[in-house]
Amino acid sequence: MKPSTLIFYAIEETMKTYRKLSSKEIKKTISDITVDQALVLQMINDKHLTQTEIADLIFKDYASMTRIIALMIKKDYLIKRTNERDRRVSVFDITKKGDIVLKQLTPIIEKNRKKALCGLTTEDLHNLKETLNKINQNCKK
Amino acid sequence: MKPSTLIFYAIEETMKTYRKLSSKEIKKTISDITVDQALVLQMINDKHLTQTEIADLIFKDYASMTRIIALMIKKDYLIKRTNERDRRVSVFDITKKGDIVLKQLTPIIEKNRKKALCGLTTEDLHNLKETLNKINQNCKK
DNA sequence: TACTATTACTTGATATATCAATTATCATGA
DNA sequence: TCATGATAATTGATATATCAAGTAATAGTA
């Protein structure tokens, strides 16, 4: 198969393998949270972002964001409030449960990232990011 | 935000942006096929792979593969047959419609990949693949 | 041959992705 | 202030992701 083909396979495979690692490690400690929900929880942490802002930060569709948030509220990780200055906008508070989980989550995610990037130099990572960004820009044109 | 964090964001963003490009370009010519279905169609092309083999090649879960294939049969892209030497195994034939679509598809996908990788050197791509593979291996340990 | 383990796939349940259409609210200019 | 256009979020429909449990067929072994 062509090298140009294999690049996209490699990106896809790496992403999926990393997500599996994440999910597996998170589940060892926290049973009822998904990788995406964990990501959202980290994003919201103290920052009072709106749904749209969170979605943009983690590259989620707004529709997906609505549903992820809905499940997180149902599971008592978040509380939704309306921003009174602009009633279209929702902002979120993290519940006690959310706070506890967040504290457990942070070192797990840190550990996963370390494991995933083990043996790579700063230069490797820099180049990786640069190349990915170029591809990303190309695709957006 | 930490560089190690940003790496995974970059991978995720790049993958999603590329999928959007793919999907948009494919839809211009073929209205009722998804990116994943197109990928499966290309894989099956002449090779008579089993579901499990296809799934492994494109990093899909077997359950997802069952459903993707089911939709492709419903849309008349594929015909499913049982391998008579081992009746657990399914193999697939591409229909006339599938063949036509496949011929249209190939140059589109080629063009997308070229666009996405425009301006990158062979070395860039080689390094990208190497680094991704290292991450992938790390995650699997 | 009968039993057991393995393999290939399927199904159910839940989560997320994506597009299109819709609702509620806000901003702006006539 | 009213009409119009934007923005933030939601909802519906369909596709895919993931895990667990289940089915059918096969392979391997006592």
Image (cartoon, coloured by chain):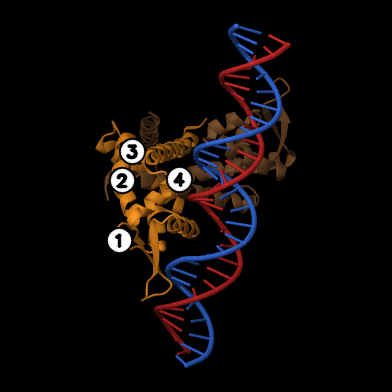
Chain colours: A brown, B orange, C blue, D red
Question: Mark 1 against mark 4, which lies toward the viewer?
Answer: 1
Q: Chain of mark 3?
A: B
Label 3 amino acid? Asn
Q: CA distance from mark 3 to mark 2?
A: 13 Å
Labels 3 and 1 in the same subunit: yes
- Indicate which disc, 3 or 2, sits on the residue closer to the N terminus: 2
Secondary structure beneath label 3: helix
Q: How many marks?
A: 4
Labels 1 and 2 in the same subunit: yes
The residue at the point 36 percent across, 37 percent down is: A124
**On the image, numbered disc 3 is attached to which residue?**
B112
Labels 3 and 4 in the same subunit: no
Q: CA distance from mark 1 to mark 4?
A: 27 Å
Q: Nearer the viewer, residue B99 or B8?
A: B99
Q: Nearer the viewer, residue A33 or C11?
A: C11
Secondary structure beneath label 4: helix
**On the image, numbered disc 4 is attached to which residue?**
A15
